[in-house]
């Protein structure tokens, strides 16, 4: 299975039809989700973006935290529990994603959003499919200045 990466650095403005075609190609390419297990370093709810802490355990991701974003929690757990998470694939849920936007970004508390952050780190986590789903494709590690 090939892992695709979305980059946040753009060298120019792409045409809308090119973005739509690319988004459709990505969504059609990823029919199944890659699911893995990880131990929690803190309490984690299902349905949030997670990242690694310095000990290699899962914590809730935030645009204000540095680290490697690894996926979307499929199950919830307390500190020390092992949870399932999706590394890549189609994520469906009770979202309200703006379908006029192409990209999904990491929000403040592990929430996916189509609004690019005005502060914190800009982290693209996927592309919008519809108001209730997106294709999860994690970008590079969050670095602090």
Image (cartoon, rainbow, N blue to C red):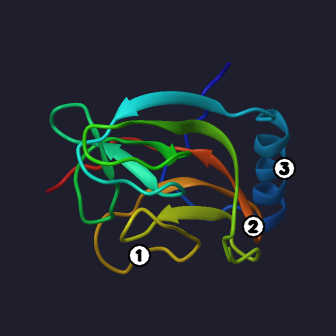
Q: Which mark is residue 24?
A: 3
Q: Nearer the viewer, residue 81 or 91?
A: 81
Tell me which label, 3 or 2, sits earlier in the chain.
3
Left or right: residue 106 compared with residue 118: right
Labelled pair 1, 3 in contact (Cβ < 8 Å): no
Tell me which label, 2 or 1, sits earlier in the chain.
1
* Location of residue 95 in the rendering, given as x and y in whole percent from the top left corner: 66, 71
Quarter of the picture containing the N terminus is top right
Can residue 130 be seen by looking at this rendering? yes
* Image quadrant in which you'd find residue 80: top left
> Is the residue marked by circle 1 packed among few (<14), some (14-19), or many (20+) residues within 10 Å?
some
Quarter of the picture containing the C terminus is bottom left
* Location of residue 128 in the rendering, given as x and y in whole percent from the top left corner: 71, 61
Residue pictured at 62% horizontal, 62% vertical: 103
Say which element carries label 3: helix
Left or right: residue 5 compared with residue 26: left
* Location of residue 4 in the rendering, given as x and y in whole percent from the top left corner: 61, 33
Residue lying farthest top?
A: 1
Residue beneath disc 2? 132
């Amino acid at each position: 299975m090939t892992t695709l990466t979305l980059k946040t650095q753009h060298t120019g403005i792409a045409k809308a039809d090119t973005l739509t075609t690319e988004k459709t190609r990505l969504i059609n390419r990823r029919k199944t989700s890659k699911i893995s297990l990880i131990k929690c370093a803190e309490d984690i709810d299902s349905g949030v973006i997670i990242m690694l802490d310095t000990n290699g355990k899962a914590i809730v991701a935030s645009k204000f935290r540095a680290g490697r974003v690894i996926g979307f929690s499929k199950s919830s757990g307390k500190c020390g529990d092992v949870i399932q998470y999706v590394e890549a694939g189609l994520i469906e849920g009770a979202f309200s994603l703006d379908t006029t936007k192409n990209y999904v970004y990491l929000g403040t508390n592990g929430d996916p959003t189509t609004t690019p952050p005005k502060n914190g780190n800009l982290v693209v986590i996927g592309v919008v499919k519809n108001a209730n789903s997106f294709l999860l494709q994690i970008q590079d590690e969050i670095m602090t200045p």
